[in-house]
Amino acid sequence: MATKSLHKRESDLANSNRQLEILSNGIFQNGELPTFKSKISETNQFPLKAKKLEILQINVGYMCNQVCEHCHVDAGPDRKEIMTRETMQQCLDVIKTTGAHTLDLTGGAPEMNPNFRWFVEEAAKAGIKDFIVRSNLTIIRANKKYYDLPEFFKKHNVHVVSSMPHWTRGKTDKQRGDGVFDKSIKALQELNAIGYGMPDSSLRLDLVYNPSGAFLPGDQASMEKDFKKALKEDFNIQFHNLFAITNLPISRFLDYLIASENYEDYMYSLVEAYNPAAVGNVMCTNTLSVSWDGYLFDCDFNQMLELPVNSKVKHISEYNEALLEGRHIVISQHCYGCTAGAGSSCQGVVA
Ligand code: SF4
Ligand code: SF4
């Protein structure tokens, strides 16, 4: 398993234009497969338009203590892009006034941003209904300075959402790195010990599953049952919901698909599983994604592909909800990942 980001390895695919080229050429250029635009046009759903903002997702930096095989952020310890306090302040000004019901902090490992705790303390004061931190769990056990994170999350009523690709050590470590499973289990037990994830607790703990290879996720509800049973029986761990997320063909997952010669087959499966009913609810229709340097994107995937919002408003410092509403969403073939089967978003299925 690679221990460096595509950027550090100076891979071709570290370049977002190269990724977009791959997604537009070959089977999509020669007409073997329809482009996403032509597919959604069949049901008059082009252009996709942003509705009222409900979820503000902020990526506070690409630095991470892990280098997971399928990371769409290309995160890792070698990534130095980190949101400054000044940009965080600009985000806070928006958080205080927006009508969004959910604030979603992501990374990298958001906790590694030196201003993370200050930001959480300030953002929590805005009283947003659902305040999510996407924690990779192992960060809680990575260094003594993070050991109190569960208590910190509890103090600010943070909703913890964490990746857990499987309930077995082998499958988890293969995708996320050696030792990740044991640390994740320990972190989950610590979160449970202070009330996170317990059946009647208001301290929300959800897990995210994404497939460990070039295949689509199974049924979310039955996977949740299997995860709950196995984690309870083997480790006495409880959690609330499991979100099944499809891997989008970008960044390190695209690299994996190409290296394993699965790219075309995977794109065929995504297109075959296309579900027009999922299109209206893809997450870009009610979400705005902010990058570490304050720029605005329709979603975290478009952020990684450096496809900015199609609006006069480009940066959080010039935020204007009315101008952003109704904007045309920027799409490419990676969007098939959001409309396959029951659909996929940062909160699991959408259809
Ligand atoms: S923990 Fe998340 S952000 Fe970090 S490398 Fe893994 S998938 Fe990427
Ligand atoms: S990848 Fe982003 S822009 Fe494309 S459908 Fe999914 S959420 Fe929307």
Image (cartoon, rainbow, N blue to C red):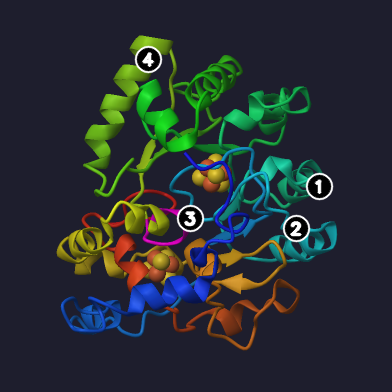
The Cα atoms of the two marked residues, 1 and 2, are separated by 8 Å
Disc 1 or 3, which lies upstream in sequence?
A: 3
Residue 136's quadrant in the figure? top right
Residue pointed to by mark 3: 72
The question of residue 21 being in magenta is answered with no
Q: Inspect the image, locate mark 2, and give the three-letter code of the amino acid beneath it.
A: Met
Q: Which quadrant does the C terminus fall into?
A: bottom left
Residue where numbered disc 2 is placed: 83
Q: Secondary structure at mark 4?
A: helix
Q: Is residue 36 above or below residue 312?
A: above
* Three-letter code for the amino acid on which mark 3 is drawn: His
How many dots with numbers?
Answer: 4
Crowd around label 3: few <14 · some 14–19 · many ≥20 (10 Å): many
Nearer-the-camera pick, 163 or 276: 163
Q: Earlier in the sequence, mark 4 or mark 1?
A: 1
Which comes sooner in the sequence, label 2 or label 4?
2
Kindly identify the residue that appears in the image at 33 percent across and 61 percent down. 338
Q: Position of residue 138 (x, y in %)?
A: 59, 29
Say which residue label 1 marks.
Answer: 115
Magenta-highlighted residues:
248-253
**Mark 3 beta carbon near ligand 1 (under 8 Å):** yes
Camera-near label (1 vs 3) is 3
> Cα distance, mark 2 to mark 4?
37 Å
Label 4 to label 1, Cα distance in Å? 35 Å
| Residue lying at 81% horizontally and 44% vertically, measured from the top left | 114
Within-10-Å neighbours for mark 1: few <14, some 14–19, many 20+: some
